[in-house]
Image (cartoon, rainbow, N blue to C red):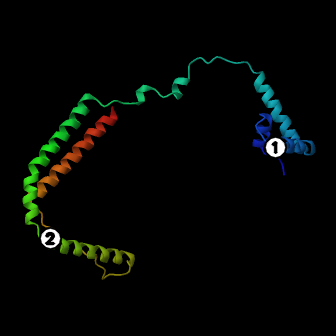
Amino acid sequence: MHLTDEQLNEYLDHETNEREQIELHLKTCHECSARFSDLQNLFLELDSLPDLQLTRDLSKRFNPSRELIRVPTRWFNLTVFAQATIALVALIIAIPFIAIYLQQIDTTMLVTSFAEVQTLWNTWLDALSTFEFESTAFELPTLPIVEMSSLLISLAGIFVVWIFGNGILLRNQIRR
């Protein structure tokens, strides 16, 4: 077995705990001895080269700069504060409506609907696991349409618009 380049480099740098074994191997193996001699000559040539001054400072490329850390703009902070305030006001206004709506909800209807959806989901997953392309009589079950009040639809619409607005806001913030 021959010595690896890593072992030879560690031996040259006095960074190895295997000095005796490496020295013994170098005395008996002409190939490793020649590689070690070439490596020594290379390092001697590198050490003999003059130190050159760089024409420009490259350290700025590798040191993190303050420009990488972006502080949110004042407009961004005001927008976030305004959104939080509007969300709090909307929540306070919606609490009485939600309380009335919760009283009208038939819990047995919810449990039954949830059980139906869960059964259909399991049926759909079972159908997908046994799906064959040749089958012509295969039909995926459809989920029941859940009736929603106009208040819930309005809240869902507001939520979608709010999420969309935040996406635009954050995308514009990242581009700067």
Query: Which SS class for mark 2?
Result: helix
Residue appearing at x 15%, y 49% in the figure? 158
Asked whether 60 or 114 is in front, the reply is 114
Q: Residue at x 39, y 79 (%)?
A: 130
Q: Vertically, is 173 above or below 140?
A: above
The residue indicated by pointer 2 is 107
* Marked residue nearer the N-terminal end (2 or 1): 1
For label 1, the residue is 18
Residue type of the residue flagged with mark 2:
Thr
Left or right: residue 24 compared with residue 45: right
Image check: 28 left or right of 115? right
Examine the image and state in which quarter residue 154 appears.
bottom left
Q: Residue at x 28, y 78 (%)?
A: 139
**Quarter of the image containing the C terminus?**
top left
Q: What percent of the width, then of the height, locates residue 71?
A: 34, 29
Label 2 crowding class (10 Å Cα cut-off): few <14, some 14-19, many 20+?
Answer: few
Left or right: 169 as drawn, with respect to 57: left
Residue 66 in view:
yes
Is residue 81 or residue 70 the one in the foreground? 81
CA gap between label 2 and label 1 equals 76 Å
Q: Residue type at mark 1?
A: Glu
Q: In this view, does 6 lie above or below 47?
A: below
